[in-house]
Image (spheres, rainbow, N blue to C red):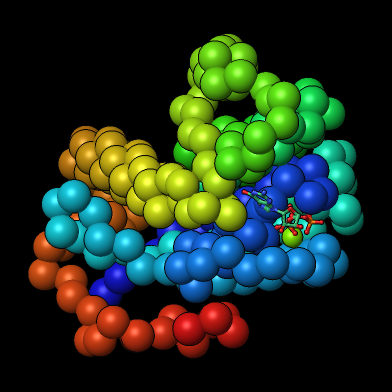
Amino acid sequence: MFNTFSVIVIGDSGVGKSSIVKYLIEGKFVKDIPTTLQPDLACKDVELRNKCKVRLQIFDAAGQESNYGSLTRSSCMDKDGALIVYNVTDRKSFDNISKWVEDAENYMPAEKTIFIVGNMIDKEVQRISTLEGKNKAANLHLKYFETSAKEGTNIHDVFHSLAEDIYAMNRKRSGYLHNRQNDDQQHILQPFDDSNEVKFKSDNECCQCCQCC
Ligand SMILES: Nc1nc2c(ncn2[C@@H]2O[C@H](COP(=O)(O)OP(=O)(O)OP(=O)(O)O)[C@@H](O)[C@H]2O)c(=O)[nH]1
Ligand SMILES: [Mg+2]
């Protein structure tokens, strides 16, 4: 049995959300992706440091439709994690990060993992500095990553780290629930499955829930 983590990629339109997800799935930069009008679902299996395998269900949100304020409770309520993406050469998308975080805080479950991602670091134009990005993320108490979907920089790392942190968060919660369960002598929740025995049947094993694998 796999642990499946559901994550959402949000941020202003055009910051590269779909390109990041495409690179993760296809291993290459796909040019001229049309703007996302309906949220897309992709799936990626990730092996954690402890060899446990988890499945990421990745919702690539439509930046245009889900402009901050219109991200809905239903699109966020069951998510374990979120990547909030901005374009390092677009100040407006950077300024809007706090609004996306506010939406995520409002609509996602209390237990969640959110990363800030500055994308398009390959661009050779004046950009928002790494320090400024890091400071903003630190003020929001969130981890910060920089990526290039064009060159593939840090794309796998960011999803891998997200999976690791969600896993750690779930283990912590599971431990807490176990303690409560012992105290209360009643069943509260199935323990989180952290078995190292979990293995893929094949590299291409599919979740049957998306178009991508
Ligand atoms: N140079 C460069 N261009 C990028 C990068 N990521 C995306 N792009 C380009 O930026 C444009 C927008 O990328 P998308 O992936 O469609 O952006 P999006 O955030 O999904 O946009 P919406 O679907 O409208 O919300 C496209 O022309 C991409 O080719 C990157 O890392 N570097
Ligand atoms: Mg898109």
Where residue 3 sits, quadrant-wise, is bottom left
Residue 79 in view? no
Q: Which residue occupies 28% across, 50% down?
A: 186
Q: Which residue occupies 67% across, 60% down?
A: 18
Q: Is residue 190 above or below residue 141?
A: below
Q: Which residue occupies 83% across, 29% down?
A: 92
Q: How many marks?
A: 0
Task: Tell me if 65 is positioned left or right of 59 in this view.
Answer: right
Q: Is residue 20 above or below residue 68?
A: below
Q: Where residue 181 sits in the image (x, y, percent)? A: 25, 44
Task: Tell me if 117 is positioned left or right of 44 in this view.
Answer: right
Q: Dividing the image into four quarters, tell me where ligand 2 lies.
A: bottom right
Task: Tell me if 116 is positioned left or right of 71 in this view.
Answer: left
Q: Residue furthest left?
A: 197
Q: Where residue 113 sits in the image (x, y, percent)? A: 48, 38
Residue 45 in view? yes
Tell me the quarter of the image containing the N terminus. bottom left
Q: Is residue 56 above or below residue 201?
A: above
Q: Which residue occupies 79% across, 50% down?
A: 14
Q: Where residue 154 sits in the image (x, y, percent)? A: 43, 45
Looking at the picture, tell me which residue is in the foreground, 9 or 130.
Answer: 130
Q: Is residue 125 above or below residue 22?
A: above
Q: Where residue 30 sits in the image (x, y, percent)? A: 63, 68
Looking at the picture, tell me which residue is in the foreground, 39 or 157.
Answer: 157
Looking at the picture, tell me which residue is in the foreground, 7 or 148.
Answer: 148
Q: Residue furthest front?
A: 124
Where residue 209 sits, quadrant-wise, is bottom right
